[in-house]
Amino acid sequence: MIRFGIRLALASGRETMIRLVMIAAAVALGVGLLLTTLAGVNAVQAQYTRSAWLYPSGGADVAVSTADPVLWTGRDTYYDRATISRLDVAATGPTSPIPPGIPRLPGPGEFYASPALDALLRVAPANQLGDRFAGRQIGIIGDSALPGPDALLAIVGNTPDALARVPDVQRLTSIGTELPASRVAAFARALDLVLSVVAGGLIFPLLMFIGNATRLSAARREQRFAAMRLVGATPGQVSVVAAVEATISAAIGAVLGFGLFFLIREPAAAIPFAGAAFFPEDMSLTVADALAVLIGVPAAAALAARFSLRRVRVSPLGVSRRVTPRPPSAFRLIPLGLGLAELGFFVVVGVPATSHAQVLVFLPGFLVIMVGLVVAGPWLTMVGARAVARRTKRAASLIAARRLADNPKSGFRSVSGLILALFVASVAIGVITTINIHRGGPLVGPSATSLVQRTPAESAVVPDGLRLDLRSIPGVQRVAVIRDASNDLPAMVIHGWTLTNLVSCADIAGHPDFGSCAPGAEVAAVIEDLSLETHWPASDKTWPTVHVSTETLARLPIKSVVVGTDGSSAALERARTTLAIAYPQAERYASTDAEHETDVRSLLNGWRQLADVVILASLVVAGSSLAVSAVGGLSDRRRPFGMLRLTGVPLRLLRRVIALETAVPLLIAAGVAIGTGFLAAHLFLTAQMSYSLRLPTVTYFVFVLGGLAVSLGIVASTLPLLRRITGPETVRNE
């Protein structure tokens, strides 16, 4: 029977071949996107594993190791709002460990640069960037040491004596290649939660799509297999033939899906949804991933084919003796309610402490909700169709509503993929929008124009010529030196802030972003970064006066140097370079308050891009699923529609029936999916971050309406087939 099934699938005429090609193409699209999703999860893990060496856990093994330690400290600097990771190292002997990606440790006055930083150094003016890396570049850092192709990284050599004066310097006798129990490992685990939800959200519509594809022209195949039963075929033989036919098309589609994956792998790797772009090689599949898809998809198609022929197995006349299926009950709402209740439970009791445990508690809730939407969809469709039938007075609406009410499962199946896509999109956009509002902050104003350079604690004298060098830079407006008075004067509490820093009123005079002193004051108590935007009431820009002489002020240690600029890139970068040269041993390099949020912004932008990818991929999958279902539905109902045309029903009426049969379940379930998505996002945000959901902008709703319009347009594009497949000759041939 297997050989007969193969012949039947490949040599049964044009219609069978067209169906095989359509199923294979649909499965190929689904498999390609599914493999890309799995590869994206693997890429994140590869990226963080490869960059683990940048965040060593310390030198606990110094006492027992015979290797010479390497002095090591990492600091970030910025250029044009992009983060540059700078790693300063100093060898203490010939056996000091060497970081990956370079052949040897750089000596004093030498440095290595990543390919992206090397390209930037070639085009950026030296006084804005290159002069920060004293000495000469001696090589390029290899890809094995970089998080991604766009990473900006420098490894700079120092003398041991100079580097030992940098705060928090480490002495390492080995360089690890695994994620330590640090903030990076915690972030990677937190990202696992996001990616797990996203992967689940993408995989569900993909599986629905593949299932719909393998059911293409199911009714036509049922009739053919019923005819086989009438001539003596056993139920087992029919099942084998059906499974072979479905397996062939799904297997061809799975193989083509791998080809599609390799075509889109490189563009997908350029999406920095984890904060940085990936190397194309990171978008790889494990053997388990490949085998699971290559074997699982055809196997699932075979099972779907066997399940779809359950009526034929009952009786060879089962296809002809069609009766109205039992209507779905309200019990179908239970899974949806359970999923929402699971998320709400953790709002009340709190979330587990570890990110891994949070994945285990949140991911099942989201997956159960998606299952619940699919399970509840037919009941919602039936309720909506009955409501339309009670209120309509038009023939097309009545026919469509009655058909949906009689068989809501079939009506909902065609839009189920799109409903899941809308749910995933609503959750993703709701979470991203809320986090962005709470964590994004402005990129304009003083927070983006004033550089703050924290200085070594023992420093009490401004380096010679620093003020003059800074003031000579076009665009630099004021230079203020902030002094630390925490050990000399009692703290002042103003507007809820404890002020232990002092500044000369002459330094901040005439610069509105720095605030002002009271008339006649010489010294004022201030915040160390002089930020009025984030810490101080907008209506009060006067710092409290401190009765200290300027001579006493000059003897206090310097806490920070704040440089007010006009916000131009040239002014900011030249001032930053000047400060980096003046304070090479500083714990942190000069930055603006806005740049401190760069990592957060990069993550948020990555998540926003990830949300865009999720929405786009989900809509592509859902639209394709809808197109397959629409074409399959027309093919399956060619005979009843043909009979209606013979009885005088106009073609335009049948077209309205088909449009309404799609629009009613689509609009009902879309509203439920969007509302459920926002509710699930609110419960997640409340439990995980204590945030309340902020609704997305009108752009999202326009996007959703556009997606629904496109979906209806896909259905409309199949309507011209109705004239050709419902003619008198079709009914006669049947």
Image: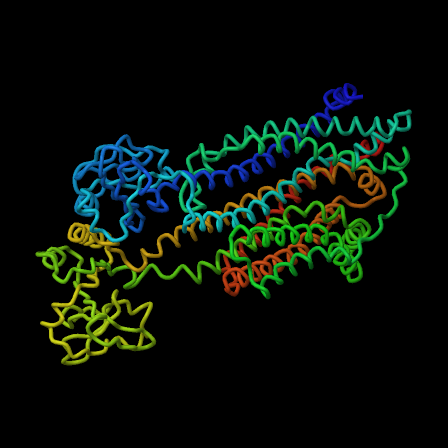
Q: Percent from the top left, x then y, of residue 63?
A: 31, 43
Q: Quadrant of the N terminus?
A: top right
Left or right, residue 319 beside residue 161 = right
Residue 389: quadrant of the picture: bottom right
Q: How is the image coloured?
A: rainbow
Residue 113: quadrant of the picture: top left
Q: Percent from the top left, x then y, of residue 519?
A: 16, 80
Q: From this view, report whether residue 280 is shown above or below residue 329.
A: above
Left or right, residue 429 beside residue 121 = right
Name which residue lies at 77% across and 61% down.
387
Residue 202 appears in view = yes
Q: Percent from the top left, x then y, of residue 388?
A: 76, 59
Q: Percent from the top left, x then y, of residue 150?
A: 35, 40
Q: Quadrant of the C terminus?
A: top right
Left or right, residue 333 beside residue 425 = right
Name which residue lies at 59% across and 47% down.
201
Nearest to the observer: residue 275 or residue 223? 275
Residue 601: quadrant of the picture: bottom left
Q: From this view, report whether residue 687 is shown above or below residue 580.
A: below
Nearest to the observer: residue 705 or residue 416? 416
Nearest to the observer: residue 723 or residue 277? 277
